[in-house]
């Protein structure tokens, strides 16, 4: 009897993007994750609000391509639409991966490198959430959005937003 060889598991690449979607007057799009943080079943855990995040699909994928793909997948927003401006902040955060998510990465991988972008969109831009990832969204003033985020890297980036987009 012949058996097909087992393929190795596909590990997440520990390189990701954070994209802060905002309007010209700095209203920031936040989305509620479908499964919270994975830490517990508390109401607070179930209210994990965040910006767009996501990992590279392959090692050679440019960060800007990852940002565009993740925005499209999570929100339905086209980063090339008229009035949209994707900005690469040339800023990277390195952080420890939450213990409950380490199983998604190759053995021994403990940290992720996250490249920060912002995407300016016109007022009234339509949002279509991917229901596998998010259950709700809201637009909040940048200060209120920073207060609402679970992730410290999301919060810190939102607080830097005025410095990166003001002309």
Image: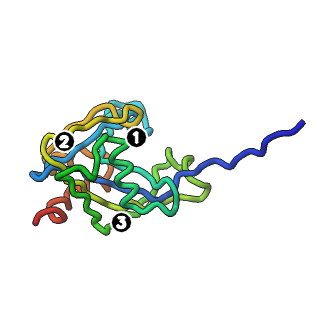
| N-term mark: 3 or 1 | 1
| N-term mark: 2 or 3 | 3
Q: What element carries label 2?
A: loop
Q: Which of the 4 quarters of the picture holds residue 30?
A: top left
Quadrant of the rendering where the C terminus is positioned: bottom left
Report, in whole angstroms, how far the alpha carbon at label 2 lies from the one at label 1.
27 Å
Q: In the displayed orientation, state which residue is furthest to the bottom.
A: 90
Instruction: Indicate left or right for 159 with 8 as reference.
Output: left
Q: Position of residue 50 (x, y in %)?
A: 30, 45
Tell me the number on the disc at residue 37. 1
Q: Is mark 1 on a helix, strand or loop?
A: loop
Instruction: Indicate left or right for 63 with 154 as reference.
Output: right
Residue 45 appearing in the image: no
**Circle 3: is it few (<14), some (14-19), or many (20+) Cα within 10 Å?**
some
- Residue 124, compared with residue 13, is above or below; it is above
Quadrant of the rendering where the N terminus is positioned: top right
Q: What element carries label 3?
A: strand
Q: Position of residue 61 (x, y in %)?
A: 46, 60
Residue located at (12% from left, 53% from top): 24
Residue located at (87% from left, 39% from top): 2
Nearest to the observer: residue 143 or residue 61:
61
Q: Check disc 3 and report the residue beneath it.
A: 92
Discs 2/3, front: 2
**Circle 2: is it few (<14), some (14-19), or many (20+) Cα within 10 Å?**
some
- Residue 126, compared with residue 153, is above or below; it is above
Q: Check disc 2 and report the residue beneath it.
A: 125
Q: Which of the 4 quarters of the picture holds residue 153?
A: bottom left
């Amino acid at each position: 009897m012949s058996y097909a060889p087992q393929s190795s598991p596909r590990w997440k690449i520990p390189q990701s993007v954070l994209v802060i979607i905002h309007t010209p007057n700095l209203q920031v799009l936040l989305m509620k994750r479908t499964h919270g943080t994975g830490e517990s079943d508390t109401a607070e855990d179930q209210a994990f609000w965040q910006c767009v995040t996501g990992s590279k699909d392959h090692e050679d994928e440019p960060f800007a391509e990852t940002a565009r793909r993740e925005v499209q997948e999570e929100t339905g927003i086209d980063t090339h639409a008229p009035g949209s401006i994707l900005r690469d902040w040339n800023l990277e955060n390195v952080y420890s991966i939450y213990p409950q998510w380490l199983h998604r990465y190759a053995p021994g991988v403990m940290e992720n490198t996250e490249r920060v972008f912002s995407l300016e969109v016109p007022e009234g831009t339509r949002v279509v959430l991917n229901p596998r990832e998010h259950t709700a969204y809201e637009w909040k003033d940048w200060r209120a959005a920073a207060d609402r985020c679970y992730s410290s890297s999301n919060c810190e980036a939102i607080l830097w937003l005025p410095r990166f987009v003001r002309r």
